[in-house]
Image (cartoon, rainbow, N blue to C red):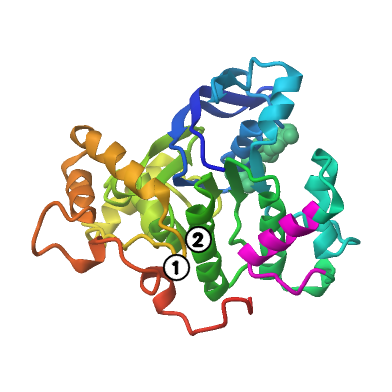
Amino acid sequence: MSGVAVDVRGLTKSFGPANIWSDVTLTLPPGEVSVLLGPSGTGKSVFLKSLIGLLKPERGSIVIHDTDLLKCSESRLYEIRKLFGVLFQDGALFGSMNLYDNIAFPLREHTRKPETEIRDIVAEKMEMVGLTGDEGKLPGEISGGMRKRAGLARALVLDPEIILFDEPDSGLDPVRTAYLNQLIIDLNAQTDSTFLIVTHDINTAQTVPDNIGLLFRKHLAMFGPREQLLTSEEPVVAQFLNGRRQGPIGMSEEKDTAQAQREMAEAGELDGLPPLKSQLAASPGMPERKAVGRRRERVLSMLPEFAPSARRAIQESYGLVGAGAPAGHVPSGPADAATETFPRVGRHDW
Ligand SMILES: Nc1ncnc2c1ncn2[C@@H]1O[C@H](COP(=O)(O)OP(=O)(O)O)[C@@H](O)[C@H]1O
Ligand SMILES: [Mg+2]
């Protein structure tokens, strides 16, 4: 299996008179990891559900393998849906089934594979997420982290070309989140599938994805390579990615513009942006992420389109400028960034 591009153009979704977002345009590059951010209620889950055809946007297109999901037949949509693996927020496991049966479920439902083959596939996916030996456990008997990993194993059994994660880190403590993030990168290295992750976790957004998008005020405020968003001084982007209090986003809802401007004025000059954190790399012993080389070509060919700060960050991340560039800008091993400040717990203990 390997990833496929997901090409979204001018997508607009409303429920009755309530518009959720309009004119969303982005391309998920094949095999790359992208993160979608946005305040609660901005329609991130609605976006994921639109991608898999569970919700129907009224305008625009979603093109996968030359098929527009908004225009194709029901039977073609059914085929396209099988390309997706989805990890829902709580793992969405059947409470009365053990992990083995939960993970085998899509294979029994969507394929005619014999039980011997199903056993091999389930064992392989359970090993990938570190659940070997837990086949007989019920979802109610295991930790939240294990439930998410079981949901992930189930999302993997049909060898999806595209994997969607809806807030995979919600409800996990920072240590488990760091492990989950490493697992996501390692799975990407093993599958080369296209990943889209909805998250609220700033550290995840800073260290996991190749690309970042931000939904805000019913629009996609920005979507691009991580270096572009992480160096952006655009107020809403800088606020979201750096956890600043000052900016257009308020505590519970999006602030009104006047209040935001007042606060910005009171705060005076904001601190400069912190240096870019390095992106997580696959663990030792994992294959290299195939997306890394493809992304390098892609992003370097786009260089002239970026603001100077983003351009420099991209060149630094590929070691193309600045002998004195901070070491943190060079992609490095998994031991740093998200994991280094956390106490060691066994890879399979969470
Ligand atoms: N099936 C639905 N029918 C009507 N409104 C919906 C439906 N699903 C979601 N919404 C509304 O769409 C908005 C965005 O929801 P959601 O995508 O869950 O936000 P997020 O995931 O960004 O927190 C919310 O106001 C929600 O009430
Ligand atoms: Mg949601």
Mark 2 or 1, nearer chain start: 2
Residue 45 in the image: x percent, y percent?
63, 42
Magenta highlight: main SS:
helix
SS at mark 2 in the image: helix
Number of numbered callouts drawn: 2
Q: Closer to the camera, 91 or 245?
A: 91
Amino acid at circle 2:
Asp
Q: Is the residue indicated by label 1 positioned so its CB lies within 8 Å of ligand 2?
A: no
Which mark, by number, is residue 257?
none
**Residue 90 appears in the rendering:** no
Residue underneath mark 2: 186
Could you tell me which quadrant the C terminus lies in?
bottom right
Residue underneath mark 1: 283
Q: Closer to the camera, 176 or 2?
A: 2
Q: Decide if residue 6 is on the left or right side of residue 276.
A: right
What's the CA distance linking mark 2 and mark 1?
6 Å
Q: Decide if residue 149 is on the left or right side of residue 237.
A: right
The residue at 17%/48% (across/down) is 312
Neighbourhood count class around disc 2 (C-alpha, 10 Å): few under 14, some 14–19, many 20 upward: many
Magenta residues, as a range? 117-135
Amino acid at circle 1:
Ser
